[in-house]
Amino acid sequence: MIPLVDLVAQYNSIKPEIDAAIQNVLTSGKFILGPQEKAFEQEIAEYLGVKHAIGVASGTDALIIALRAIGVGPNDEVIVPAYSFFATAGAVLSVGAKPVFVDIHPDTYNIDAALIEDVITKQTKAIIPVHLYGLPADMDEILAIAQKHNLMVIEDNAQAFGAKYKGKHTGAIGDLGCLSFFPSKNLGGYGDGGMVTTNDDNLAELVRMLRTHGWKKKYFPEILGYNSRLDEIQAAILRVKLKYVDQWNKARWEIAQIYSRSINGIEITTPSEIINRSHVYHLYVICLKNRNEYISFLKNKGITTEIYYPQPLFLAKPCLIENNIIREFPITSRVTHESLALPLYPEIPANRIIDVINAINGCLGTKKLLIE
């Protein structure tokens, strides 16, 4: 069986360091907002090149808190891609605002910046570009539009930790960045976790208040906040993993290149590589006709695949309630029915990569990859 991702293989590769980090937290007796979390925030800030990195309980909480920090609420609109994980739109709904959807670009599957201005209204408050699958969105164009219309930009960087846009890390480009440390992410913990990043001192102070019940001074809340903090054990684990993330991202990219060079067939679209945008391949997603046929064929070969995502955001029930008028999103609709993620993780053995390629090419009826 070839899994989509193997988290145990990664754990085994750094087991002594991880075990020691966890044991250190257990013996310290400090489990919430302690020295590990503080050090991790500093290390992430230095890695990304931002002034502030604030740990929270999940990537979803990071989005919600970022929206609250810039004052988004009822009667506001936030522009989001029509194709992403639900949290992107769900966070907007959670603060009482309306997600306004924009179709994705056919080459990158990120929000199509050329379509953003068409949906801007007097109620628009922010844009949330998602660096989907690990490929940065068109940030220059998005930032130019935001500046022109006096909008805030929140980067959903849940899937692209370590990626760069024109030499600058994603998550450090907009007004705020949101990270997820869900276990399967490029930098993943052993439970939920997230982070908000920013260069704005005032926004950073608001984020810190919002994550801890709305207080600056303990027990004296000034605004309505949340209980959303990155715990010490996760911070300790992530500090170990941060040292390896560039190495792991390089391995992901190299595996992706093998796939893209070796998968044959005009009916399959492999991921795009864009100049000045480094792809970190959180997921390796192809698009193909007759997807169910491939899923069944690969399953019979013991190869795990997954659909990211089987439903566009504008058709999710909570979004249907909020958005009475359904516009057409042709690229999103096509990709929803054609996308398929293949096994990709840094530790995947070379022979397993060849097995996946041979199986896909076998389903296509093309020549198999020779094993040298």
Image: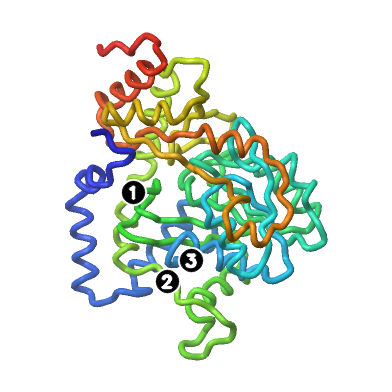
Q: CA distance from mark 1 to mark 3?
A: 19 Å
Q: CA distance from mark 1 to mark 2?
A: 22 Å
Q: CA distance from mark 2 to mark 3?
A: 9 Å
Residue visible at 50% across and 81% down in the picture: 213
Q: Badge 1: how crowded within 10 Å, few (<14), some, or many (20+)?
A: few
Is mark 1 in CB contact (under 8 Å) with mark 2?
Answer: no
* Residue holding disc 1: 243
Residue 54 pos. (x, y %): 48, 66
Q: Residue furthest top?
A: 367
Q: Is residue 213 above or below residue 340?
A: below
Residue 346 is drawn in which quadrant? top left
User: Could you tell me which quadrant the C terminus lies in?
Assistant: top left
Q: Badge 3: how crowded within 10 Å, few (<14), some, or many (20+)?
A: many
- Which circle marks residue 229 in the picture? 2
Residue 352 pos. (x, y %): 26, 27
Is mark 2 in CB contact (under 8 Å) with mark 3?
Answer: no
Q: Secondary structure at mark 1?
A: loop
- Earlier in the chain: of badge 1 and badge 2, it is 2
* Residue holding disc 3: 54
Instruction: Name the amino acid, label 2.
Output: Arg
